[in-house]
């Protein structure tokens, strides 16, 4: 039985101009169901006039080569849920190890099945473009994963033409444990991973809080530091032709992408 309201609703009587939503562009993030950090890390970096819109794909811990390979099947469905009817300017896949295991081209093709024609990037592709842009050939790498997953990231860098001078892994298989690594521990690991002949240090994984220590690490090392989330936002912004400055997250943002 319905009850008549005690007060009759009235229309709002005022005029206003709607505020634009994400006036400088929209980035769509596809991240893992178990990722505790990636979205927060990206929002620290992303300019205030760019919108970040998030969806998640199914996956499960532990993070292994097999689980990383199987989760990619959910990408087309997830892509279709990113602002349906509106779309985004760039879609980003928030998983470095998942890209390494499945391949950057396959990740892009699966996302485009759900969002045809949308520009796509991922941490490994973005790191590749970033490292070439800063002129780095020899790369020291640190990652939170178990060793075979860590190895797959290094192998993808080598396939892309880089030399890996040193490779360190924390040996973790659970996203919450990766996110729980303190930023100061990531900083110390970057310093430990560095080798005298390395042109740059790459800190892999979107689930760790490494973007916030990139600038400090660069000052201590005296060389560029590239992190997964930092590189991915830098690349996405450039794909969108965003030209305002971004500061506080390393010298990468001083560069426009190198044209290969």
Image: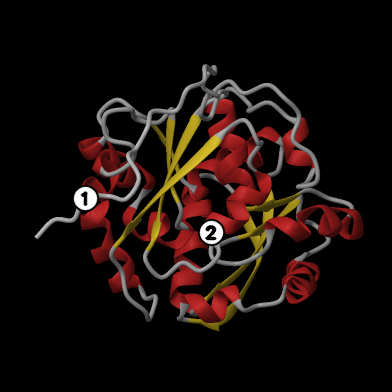
**Tag 2 secondary structure:** helix
Q: Which residue is mark 1?
A: 4
Residue 180 location, quadrant: bottom right
Label 2 vs label 1, nearer the camera:
1
Question: How many C-alpha atoms fall within 10 Å of the one at disc 1: few (<14), some, or many (≥20)?
Answer: few
Q: Name the residue at 72% across, 37% down.
A: 135
Q: Position of residue 152 (x, y in %)?
A: 44, 64
Contact between labelled residues 1 and 2, with CB atoms less than 8 Å apart: no
Q: Which numbered disc, 2 or 1, marks the residue that appears first in the sequence?
A: 1
Q: Name the residue at 27% across, 35% down.
A: 84
On screen, residue 169 versus residue 36, left or right, reads: right
Q: Name the residue at 51% across, 70% down.
A: 150
Q: Looking at the picture, does residue 2 appear above or below residue 135?
A: below
Q: Position of residue 197 (x, y in %)?
A: 79, 57
Which is more toward the observer, 66 or 176?
176
Q: Which mark is residue 29?
A: none
Q: Name the residue at 48% across, 75% down.
A: 175
User: Could you give the CA–CA distance between mark 2 and mark 1, rounded to whole angstroms?
Assistant: 47 Å
On screen, residue 165 versus residue 245, left or right, reads: left
Which is more toward the observer, 108 or 86?
86
Q: Looking at the picture, does residue 116 appear above or below residue 9?
A: above
For residue 14, say whether it is visible.
Answer: yes
Q: Position of residue 57 (x, y in %)?
A: 31, 59
Q: Which mark is residue 38?
A: 2
Residue 118 location, quadrant: top left
On screen, residue 58 versus residue 36, left or right, reads: left
Which is more toward the observer, 76 or 53?
53
């Amino acid at each position: 039985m319905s009850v008549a309201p005690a007060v009759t609703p009235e229309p709002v009587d005022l005029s206003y101009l709607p505020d634009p939503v994400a006036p400088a562009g929209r980035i769509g993030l596809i991240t893992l169901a178990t990722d505790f950090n990636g979205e927060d890390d990206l929002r620290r970096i992303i300019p205030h006039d760019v919108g970040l819109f998030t969806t998640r794909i199914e996956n499960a811990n532990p993070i292994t080569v097999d689980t990383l390979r199987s989760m990619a099947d959910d990408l087309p469905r997830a892509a279709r849920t990113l602002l349906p009817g509106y779309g985004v300017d760039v879609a980003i896949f928030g998983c470095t190890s998942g890209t390494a295991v499945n391949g950057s081209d396959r990740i892009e093709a699966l996302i485009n099945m759900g969002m045809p024609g949308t520009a796509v990037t991922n941490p490994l592709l973005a790191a590749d473009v970033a490292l070439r842009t800063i002129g780095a050939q020899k790369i020291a790498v640190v990652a939170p994963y178990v060793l075979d997953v860590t190895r797959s990231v290094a192998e993808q860098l080598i396939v892309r033409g880089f030399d890996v001078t040193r490779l360190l892994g924390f040996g973790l298989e659970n996203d919450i444990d990766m996110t729980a690594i303190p930023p100061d521990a990531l900083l110390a690991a970057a310093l430990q991973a560095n080798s005298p002949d390395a042109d740059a240090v790459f800190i892999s994984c979107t689930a760790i809080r490494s973007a916030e220590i990139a600038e400090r690490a660069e000052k201590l090392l005296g060389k560029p530091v590239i992190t997964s989330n930092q590189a991915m936002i830098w690349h996405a912004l450039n794909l969108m032709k965003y030209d305002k400055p971004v500061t506080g997250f390393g010298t990468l943002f001083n560069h426009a992408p190198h044209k290969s």
